[in-house]
Image (cartoon, rainbow, N blue to C red):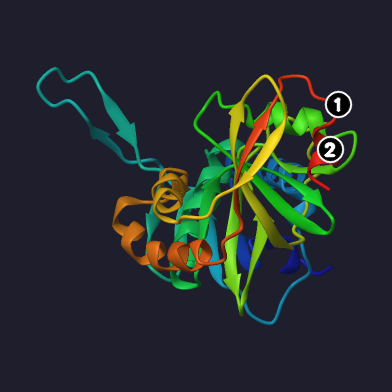
């Protein structure tokens, strides 16, 4: 590996290649910050690291600059915010004072931009690999998305417990993991691999386990839209892809017990 290669990381997320450039520094304080951040990013996103590609879909550059501080509440002069990054269109400029957690949300911002242009979106859902396809489990906070995974992990591999990336590829939809830190790290194994989308379940806690197929699409559109994680200005564009997903008619109501040993068999 050359010295130049050591200044770059390449991440494969959502089927996109994101180039990360760590601008070289000479000052000791800058070097320590750079070394810390490179180590954190490598450790946090190791499953997404890839070899140098011919081209990249996006570029993020880290520089050592003094942060610009803006007043947020001018009247009381108490609240301030610091510049997080600068969007220059073809690349993002950011700073070495970030940590890996903050960087994950910067990655998500970059992903949102790419997904809008490439028929994709982020959904609030848990997910499981069942019969070589990814089934999604959706519902508002507290509906039991993680509980479903706990009931299924004996039979199937949990894929995500909070958010997933969905992209239309040809006539199919593919599902990817997001770069966000999953709360159940022991249960979720991070990977850049994608799988075909299987079924989407809207989940409900109940006294017994049951699956009902949803025939009409009107309610599906509204419920799916509520779980779309997108910027306000992008929703109209992503809604077109969402409608194509609705036309797949792969939606079900899933009723489940809090502790269910039979749920895995029900989803075969």
List x then y, in percent, for residue 22.
61, 57
User: Which residue sits at x=86%, y=43%?
Assistant: 156
Badge 1 vs badge 2, beta-carbon distance below 8 Å: yes
Is residue 58 found left or right of 136 in the rendered image? left
Q: Is residue 186 above or below residue 5?
A: above
Tell me, yes or no, if residue 26 can be seen here. Answer: no
**Nearest to the observer: residue 147 or residue 29:** 147
**Nearest to the observer: residue 155 or residue 228:** 155
Q: Is residue 69 above or below residue 104?
A: above
Q: Is residue 128 above or below residue 237?
A: above
**Residue indicated by mark 2:** 264
Question: What's the CA distance linking mark 1 and mark 2?
Answer: 7 Å
Numbered label attached to residue 116: none
Q: Is residue 134 above or below residue 248?
A: above
- Quadrant, the N terminus: bottom right
Q: Could you say whether the residue bearing mark 2 is in a helix, strand or loop? A: helix
List x then y, in percent, for residue 205.
62, 24
**Nearest to the observer: residue 179 or residue 263:** 263
**Residue indicated by mark 1:** 261
Tell me, yes or no, if residue 264 can be seen here. Answer: yes
User: Which residue sits at x=17%, y=25%?
Assistant: 73
């Amino acid at each position: 590996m050359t010295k130049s290669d050591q200044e770059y990381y390449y991440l494969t997320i959502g089927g996109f290649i994101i180039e990360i450039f760590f601008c070289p520094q000479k000052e000791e304080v800058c070097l320590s910050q750079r070394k810390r951040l490179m180590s954190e990013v490598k450790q946090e996103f190791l499953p997404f690291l890839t070899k140098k590609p011919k081209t990249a879909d996006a570029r993020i550059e880290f520089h050592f600059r003094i942060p610009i501080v803006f007043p947020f509440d001018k009247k009381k002069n108490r609240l301030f915010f610091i510049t997080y990054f600068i969007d220059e269109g073809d690349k993002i400029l950011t700073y070495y004072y970030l940590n890996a957690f903050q960087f994950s949300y910067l990655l998500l911002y970059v992903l949102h931009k790419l997904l809008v242009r490439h028929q994709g979106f982020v959904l609030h859902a848990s997910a499981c690999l069942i019969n070589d396809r990814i089934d999604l489990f959706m519902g508002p906070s507290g509906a039991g998305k993680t509980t479903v995974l706990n009931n299924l992990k004996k039979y199937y591999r949990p894929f995500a417990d909070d958010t997933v990336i969905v992209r239309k590829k040809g006539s199919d939809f593919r599902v990817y993991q997001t770069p966000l830190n999953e709360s159940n790290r022991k249960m979720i194994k991070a990977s850049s691999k994608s799988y075909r989308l299987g079924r989407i379940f809207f989940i409900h806690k109940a006294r017994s386990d049951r699956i009902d197929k949803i025939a009409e699409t009107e309610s599906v559109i509204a419920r799916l839209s509520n779980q779309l994680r997108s910027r306000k200005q992008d929703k109209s564009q992503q809604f077109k892809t969402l409608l194509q997903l609705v036309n797949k008619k792969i939606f079900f109501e899933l009723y489940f017990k809090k502790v269910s040993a039979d749920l895995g068999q029900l989803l075969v």
